[in-house]
Image (tube, rainbow, N blue to C red):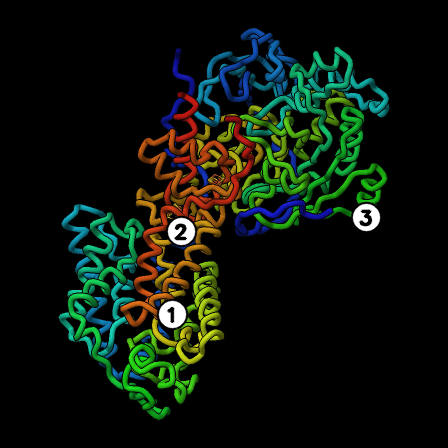
Amino acid sequence: MGLKASFRGVSLPPQKVSNPAIENAPLPQRVVLPLGHGGDLVCEPVVEIGEEVKTGQLVGQSGDFLLAPVHSSISGRVADIRPWFDQLGNEVLSVIVESDGNDSWEEELRSDERFLEKETVQLLTDLKAAGVVEIGPPAMPLHAKFAHPERPKEFLFLVGIPRAKLVDTVIINCIDAEPGMSLKGAVLQENSSEILAGIKIVQKLMDTAQVVLAVGSNGSLNAPLTSELAGLGVKVYQGKDKYPLGLNPILIKCVTGREIPLPDGSEQDIGVAVVDAATLVHLVEAVRDLKPQVERVVSLSGAGMGAVKNYKVRLGTVVGDLIEQLGGLKGEPIKVIAGGAMTGIALFSTDIPVTKNIDALIFQTAGEAKSFSQDACINCGTCVRHCPARLLPGELSKYCEFGMFEEARDKYLLHCIECGICAYVCPEKRPMLHLMRYGKRELSLG
Amino acid sequence: MNKAVSIDKPMLRVSVAPHILEKRTTSHLMYHTLLALVPALLAGIYFFGFAALKLALICMATAVACEAGMQGLMGRKLAVKNGSGLLLGLLFALVCSPELPWWTAVVGTAIAVILGREIYGGLGNNPFNAVLVGWAVVRISFAEQMNTWIMPEPLFGLEPGGYIEYPPLEVMKIDGVEALVDLPWLDLFIGNVPGTIGTVSVVAVLIGAVYLLARRIITWHIPVSFLASAWLFGIIFWLIDPETYANPTIHLLSGWMVLGAFFLATDKGTVPVTGPGMIIFGIGCGLITMIIRYWGGYVDGVAFAILLMNATTGLLDRVRPRVYGRVKEVA
Ligand code: SF4
Ligand code: SF4
């Protein structure tokens, strides 16, 4: 399947290791489980301080459709329920569980091989109960992606968001978008049976939709998998190595030729749903094993790590604890980044828990960490040549720098997809992405 | 609310994404462009002797001194290191006659730096190409000094090209097209004719241009549309009346055309940044150049064409591609 559209972008330095094997991280001594995933909404805690909890036990719940339930990722005792910083520096009410070291599950996991015979409503109910979250931005419960206007009321009630538009394309995103991420290719290799099962579930939930598996140059599909995919009627989209192909807005454009209507639109508005490969595996575990999402695969990299590694980490493991348990770092990190090298967030402390919305951690040493200048734009136009949204980032950055936010809005600031390319290429090393986000935030405050 | 997390751990650096940056900086751009101009300078030295090198050094020193002085005076960060002053000085020298008195060169360069660039806020924020501003001022004020030419005397190897005593465009303007019939095109191409230091040798300039394109410091849009539009415009008139109008290829090979298209019309900050904008800019430059060459009062139109088109940059930057996700606006 070929490219439906070309886009501007950059070739980023390639990963040194491709698809490192996924190892299990050691069981943490304590976990910090935030009851929300960004935003002001948080779940109600359903456990009390001092209570014993099992792995997979529900600890937080909410009636809101945009909040996934939270489960304990280890067994032990609830030590505290109090606000804790998330990766953005917001305080989020969190349940802190201290491990008893047993990792005993609430219910024995049992694999139900007949999961495909379940009713769609049942599938969705199981998925929702497992609290699977699709990685952002914006992070959202996975079941919300499967809105379907032609389904019975119960189905709609589960999804919660009435949509008029029928999703006709589901894209399974297996592309590791940015340096620092190497998990999706690895997931595709190691969990190919789950990927296939997941595709079948998706096909059942969205029966009229075409499923497209998007792989980058890192994703090698072996022959049996290819033929199975063909048998399922899945199209394979082979992408090239160019950032930001792995980012949803551009991926959708390349696969379907459609663009998300900005500033307010979402992928549902154009009948597309993008599901991350790693999330798809959680989807299968949720409906097949009735296993809540208690872990996720995280890529660890950077000079501090030495090598690129993939670990399956229990949710809520504090980054500092994780490093300690893995035997420390090779180099003193000066910057710890949650997410990829192009769009990730630099953590202000290693006391931040791994959440469902963190898929990579980069430990940069002093030699690696970059900083921005405060120099003026020289109007060189480099950013313009590379902006995938076809904006004039240099001009926008000046508007934002000088507080002319309305002018920036007129010049389509809100169409920026925050890929970070303009900052990457700028010869003056201006903090371009910061200025874009700053402008957007000021506009959103009105 | 009690303190949620103790932050007295080892300090981590926080910054916004991205966390990797391309190696290329402004100084990279400037020094690579300087490097790309070295062949043109060497050609100038080869044909006109060390007077050319002397002039280049004077201009570069003046430019750097003025730049540093202005930045100090205006309390800005000293940015001499990035090489933009050196580049400006060298470009100025390359578009002057090797016979130019040193004081004229100093005045021209100083005007270029101070009035052409620094008073607008420095590199990239000047509306007009600084080199050309400086050049235009001295060209008008000291027309005589700017119009003294010497014959090329290649240091070794080649025979001096003695067909014409003035730069080809002057000959064409004054004596008409027939005066150039004997002139071998090869002389024009390698630069064995009178003219300014860096523009006589088309081949040397092209070597630098290929380097810039290969390094992606400039894009093809402006040079290609500049040269193509000039040539196409020229061929129309040449086909109509070859007695009055010269073969357009001669026009491309003489005067500032090639240096202008690759080095002056791509000056960062004074030209549009979008693809379509750049192409319109290039076409405009090409047409105005030819119009001035054919019917204008000045011999070579490149400088004024670029300056004129610089004025339209703000307008041409409105010509932009459709942005991602733009839906038809409802009025
Ligand atoms: S302006 Fe936005 S979309 Fe364009 S390069 Fe910058 S971050 Fe990416
Ligand atoms: S790349 Fe940087 S200096 Fe160049 S136009 Fe863009 S913001 Fe300005």
Which residue occupies the foreground of this view, A410 or A102? A410
Residue type at numbered disc 3:
Ala
Disc 2 element = loop
Q: Which residue is mark 1?
A: B257
Which residue occupies the foreground of this view, A13 or B191? B191
The correct choice, above or below, for B129 with respect to A214 in the image is below
Report, in whole angstroms, how far the alpha carbon at label 1 lies from the one at label 3: 58 Å
Instruction: Mark 1 vs mark 2: tell me if same chain.
Output: yes
Q: Which residue is mark 3?
A: A223
Q: Position of residue B130 (x, y in %)?
A: 26, 58
On what subunit does the disc labeled 2 rest? B
Q: Which residue is mark 2?
A: B272
The correct choice, above or below, for A408 with respect to B254 in the image is above
Q: Position of residue B104 (x, y in %)?
A: 16, 70
Residue drawn where x is 43% and y is 72% of the image: B206
Which residue occupies the foreground of this view, A289 or B76? B76
Residue A409 located left or right of residue B70: right
Report, in whole angstroms, how far the alpha carbon at label 1 lies from the one at label 2: 19 Å
Q: Position of residue B54 (x, y in %)?
A: 21, 76
Residue type at numbered disc 1:
Met
Residue B124 located left or right of residue B72: right
Q: Quadrant of residue A120?
A: top right
Label 2, residues with CA under 10 Å away: few <14, some 14-19, many ≥20: many
On what subunit does the disc labeled 3 rest? A
